[in-house]
Image (cartoon, rainbow, N blue to C red):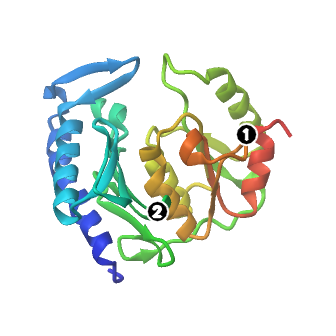
Amino acid sequence: MPQASATLNVMIAAARKAARALARDFGEVENLQVSRKGPSDFVSTADLKAEKTLYEELSKARPGYGFVMEERGVVEGTDKSHRWLVDPLDGTTNFLHGIPHFAVSIGLEREGVLVAGVVYNVVRDELFWAEKGAGAYLNDRRLRVAARNDLRDALIATGAPFHGKPGHDVFLREVERVIAKTAGVRRWGAASLDLAYVAAGRFDAFWERNLSAWDIAAGAVLVREAGGVVTEPDGGDFMKTGAVLASNTALAPLIAQTLRGG
């Protein structure tokens, strides 16, 4: 494996430790205790255990760093320069239905800038990792975004709003426009992996709205370090609006124009 920084090694170790328990629970998914957290928004004992592991491991290794976590929310740290953005189980609905497509996602922000990311595909044992200025990797292989520049050849990933959440009308209009101009659209249910797949060149682009910071942080670092761009479709700050578009430099403006109806 290429040389990772001490901080990245901390992130990788924490992700792998949390993933071991997730893998065991996934093997017994029918026996999990599951509570309803909201419309189509589930939280499982596996999710909570994974978050507890990540919180403890990252806190032990980097005392004082703050957190933004799916279940715990914002945890202020004494070190105001750093904070972790953590999704312990991205793809919870897949997990609970026995679909082997979910991940542990850890991003690191320094002085408000995303500087490192780890996305671990638990079932496939694929470790995507990147650090600002040092490139993006899948296990020990350097990643580059796909080089396609014609929308007609492009395979695009997206995410649909859950039942009970806003944005269905916008999503349906956008997906209709994109389908009409591309080779196809996929909806796999785990934004961190969608972004990692863009970094790996498996998808040519990914867009989604109404995401949370922990959904985007790690994957955004991966795409950028793989030579791609990560923007907000309407020109804002994707970490604040939760709307993200990731692709290579050639396709990104074409997809943004298509989403707007152009």
Question: 65 or 187, which lies in front?
Answer: 65
- Which residue occupies 52% across, 57% down? 220
Establish if 51 lies above or below 137: above
Q: Quadrant of residue 233?
A: top right
Q: Secondary structure at mark 2?
A: loop
Q: Quadrant of residue 52?
A: top left
The image shows residue 115 at horizontal and vertical percentages of 46, 66
Image quadrant in which the C terminus is located: top right
Q: Which residue is found at the position 48% from the left and 61% from the top?
A: 114
Mark nearest the camera among 2 and 1 is 2
- Which quadrant, please, contains the N terminus? bottom left
Q: Is residue 121 above or below residue 175?
A: below
Query: Gap between marks 2 and 1, in whole Å?
Result: 36 Å
Residue at 37%, 39% in the rendered image: 91
| Residue at numbered disc 2 | 111
Q: Which mark is residue 178?
A: 1
Q: Amino acid at mark 2?
A: Glu
- Locate residue 173, reporting x and y percent: 73, 27
Tell whether 82 sits left or right of 222: left
Is 96 in front, or is 67? 67
Instruction: Tell me what residue is drawn at x 37 percent, y 76 percent.
Output: 140
Q: Position of residue 148 (x, y in %)?
A: 71, 63
> Element at badge 1?
helix
Circle 2 Cα neighbour tier, 10 Å, few/some/many (<14 / 14–19 / ≥20) = few
- Point out residue 170 in the picture as x, y percentages from the top left corner: 68, 26
Q: Looking at numbered disc 1 in the image, what kind of residue is underneath it?
A: Val
Q: Which residue is nearer to you in this view: 217 or 109?
A: 109
Residue that sits furthest to the right in the current view = 262
User: Horizontally, is 61 left or right of 246 in the view?
Assistant: left
Q: Quadrant of residue 243?
A: top right
